């Protein structure tokens, strides 16, 4: 049975309801909003807006992990995320803040500056990453990725994508617990679009409930992703390029609700208000008792 609460630093999330993670990319090259929030004032205003719209967590990212993205140095990533984290912590002292990073050095600096969660596309697989978070009380999100961002979409191959993703996440959970990271701090993410074809993504979404075998809360991130363009293009009998990121908001919102209906506990999104409203309607419809 999955944990019913998630420890996030000094706070907790009650997992009896779904939660929303608002995306704050402070990068020049993220696939959807690269360059939009690099200035601290803009970033803080956007984060505050997402909190007002219903975000439970703000996820700050200083390195793009879109397909084909190049790595950034430790210093560059620190210069991007730390000023935003420190300013947001001062401006919104009770907000839960996540840092999207794989670098142990960035993790340590972010935790020292008040981060509540580490969201790692490499599932704490970099040397020193487990040690960087073990002595804290932060939450950790372990994501599955086949390959590396620069080349992960070249030729992704699986014998059974659902089983392989579940097995990988199970092994990373064990690595965490052996390091002393309690299960009430661990979230898992199947990694839609990270080393996966459209067919792989569809199989994962269709069998999302299989992730419950890992007995951990599930985070999904499909917001504005290319897989949505692939689905829309197939339905419209056109090409994915006809559906750029700004045309994928509705599709991503529907996918988020579908995921929650099939066991996801947290939704990572660019479009907080839309997902909030959609989840509110879904919850009202599914809990309505016509006899009351």
Image: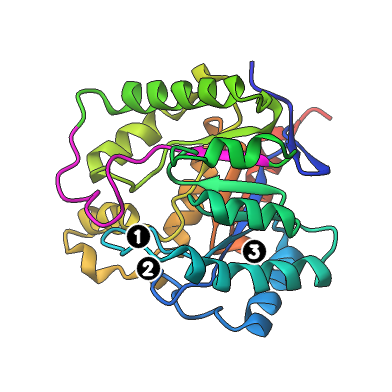
Foreground label between 2 and 3:
2
Crowding at label 2, few (<14), some or many (≥20) Cα neighbours within 10 Å? Answer: some
Q: Which span is picked out in magenta?
A: 139-157
Residue hosting label 3: 273
Query: x, y (%) of residue 228?
Result: 34, 55
Residue hosting label 1: 66
The front one of 278 and 209 is: 209
| Residue depicted at 55% across the width and 72% down the height | 80
- Total residue callouts: 3
Which image quarter: residue 191? Answer: top left
Query: x, y (%) of residue 30?
Result: 41, 69
Query: x, y (%) of residue 289?
Result: 76, 31
Q: Which element carries disc 1, helix, strand or loop?
A: loop
Image quadrant for the C terminus? Answer: top right
N-terminal of the two: label 2 or label 3?
Answer: 2
Q: How is the image coloured?
A: rainbow
The front one of 46 and 87 is: 87
Crowding at label 3, few (<14), some or many (≥20) Cα neighbours within 10 Å? Answer: many
| Residue depicted at 78% across the width and 65% down the height | 89
Q: Are marks 1 and 3 in contact (CB under 8 Å)?
A: no
């Amino acid at each position: 049975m999955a944990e019913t609460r998630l420890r996030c630093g000094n706070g907790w999330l009650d997992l009896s309801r779904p939660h929303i993670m608002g995306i704050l990319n402070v990068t020049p090259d993220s696939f959807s909003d690269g360059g939009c929030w690099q200035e601290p004032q803009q970033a803080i205003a956007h984060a505050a807006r997402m909190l007002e719209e219903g975000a439970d967590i703000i996820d700050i990212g200083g390195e793009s992990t879109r397909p084909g993205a190049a790595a950034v140095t430790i210093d560059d990533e620190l210069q991007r995320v730390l000023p935003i984290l420190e300013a947001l912590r001062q401006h919104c002292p009770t907000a839960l803040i996540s840092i999207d990073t794989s670098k142990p050095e960035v993790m340590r600096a972010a935790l020292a500056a008040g981060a509540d969660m580490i969201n790692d596309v490499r599932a704490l697989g970099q040397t020193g990453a487990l040690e960087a978070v073990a002595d804290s009380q932060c939450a950790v999100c372990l994501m599955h990725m086949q390959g590396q961002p620069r080349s992960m979409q070249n030729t992704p191959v699986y014998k059974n994508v659902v089983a392989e993703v579940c097995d990988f996440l199970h092994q990373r959970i064990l690595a965490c617990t052996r390091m002393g990271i309690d299960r009430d701090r661990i979230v898992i993410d199947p990694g839609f679009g990270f080393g996966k074809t459209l067919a792989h993504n569809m199989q994962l979404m269709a069998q999302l409930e299989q992730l419950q075998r890992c007995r951990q809360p599930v985070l999904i991130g499909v917001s504005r992703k290319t897989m949505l363009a692939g689905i829309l293009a197939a339905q419209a009998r056109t090409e994915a390029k006809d559906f750029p990121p700004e045309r994928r908001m509705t599709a991503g919102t529907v996918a988020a609700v579908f995921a929650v209906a099939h066991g996801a506990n947290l939704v990572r999104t660019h479009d907080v208000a839309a997902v909030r409203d959609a989840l509110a309607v879904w919850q009202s419809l599914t809990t309505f008792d016509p006899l009351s």
